[in-house]
Image (cartoon, rainbow, N blue to C red):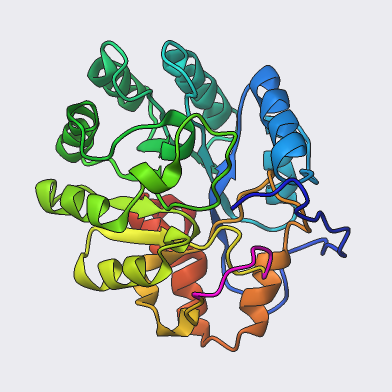
Amino acid sequence: MLHTDLPSFNDAEGSFIPDGLPTVIDSHVHIFPGKIFSSVWSWFDQYAWKIRYQMDTSLLINYLLDHGVSHVVALQYAHKPGISEGLNAYMVKKCNEFKGRVTGMATVFPGEPSADQILLKAFSDGLKGVKLHAHVQCFDMNSPDMDVIYDICEKENKPMVMHVGREPKSEEYACDPYAICRADKLEAVLNNFPKLNICVPHLGFDEIAAYKDLIEKYDTLWLDTAMVLTDYFPYDNRIGLENYRIDRIMYGSDFPNIPYAWDRELMWLKNALFSFEDLEQILYKSAARFFNLSQAV
């Protein structure tokens, strides 16, 4: 669970991706318009950790690219109905600003009017999939409102990134993530929409073992590594990443909303004694396949 006393680190940061690593696609980078970003940072400062990199969208994307990240997957989520179209337009604008270097995901608030049309418009404008966050948006994965979104994405062959792991939770959310986020609920989605590709961030934290089992069972499920390889969160159910189905694991940083150096997770991967082939899978091949990023590699 999130606590207000979670630390922030002033650990050393590298000026470039660590030597010896292959191409890096960061599959989990947050962007928002300025006022929303400021609100996000304020919430984290009050209820979680001090965000180290408080910079606007263009600066943060340039920061990663200048430090050697080859491609950025940009994520947003609508925290209330009625703002999705504006967020999607902002995402399109930023993708156009960084033509060929940024892949943008659309968002929608489950249950809002014309959710299907909002997504079809976003896809026609060039966005490559959908990002949702159950802790913030408080949706039931198995509800009819979600079926509309799954159906559109499956028919349009667009992937979904859904934060549906139970952690990191906070009592400040409007709903209890433990009541709405369970691996078995996601498995029902995988069965009901068998052509829909889904990525669950943070290795499905804290149902680590259950999500490891799911990626072995379903070819349409991926996991990203954001913040769980850095020894930041205290938890007991660790599973060595070397025991995972590596072709379903993708690197993501959660930048800029992190409390430590931007390359902390990359250094962990470098020092973990993976084969170069496994590092290629984690750092770019899995993301390239999931997001259809042939131009990024």
Expressed as whole percent of the image width and height from the top left, the position of residue 199 reads: 36, 53
Q: Is residue 132 left or right of residue 191?
A: right
**Nearer to the camera, 147 or 61:** 147
Does the segment drawn in magenta span residue 238?
Answer: no
Q: Is residue 139 left or right of residue 149?
A: right
Expressed as whole percent of the image width and height from the top left, the position of residue 236 reads: 55, 74
**Across the whole image, how many numbered discs are drawn on residues?**
0
Part of the protein shown in magenta? 231-237
Expressed as whole percent of the image width and height from the top left, the position of residue 68 reads: 69, 58
Q: Residue at x 60, y 69 (%)?
A: 229
Decide whether the magenta segment is chiefly helix, strand or loop. loop
Depicted 278 relative to depicted 202: above or below: below
Expressed as whole percent of the image width and height from the top left, the position of residue 247 reads: 36, 72
Q: Residue at x 14, y 36 (%)?
A: 155
Q: Quadrant for residue 127, please give it.
A: top left
Q: Residue at x 87, y 65 (%)?
A: 12
Q: Quadrant for residue 289, please give it.
A: bottom left
Depicted 274 relative to depicted 118: above or below: below
**Nearer to the camera, 183 or 74:** 183
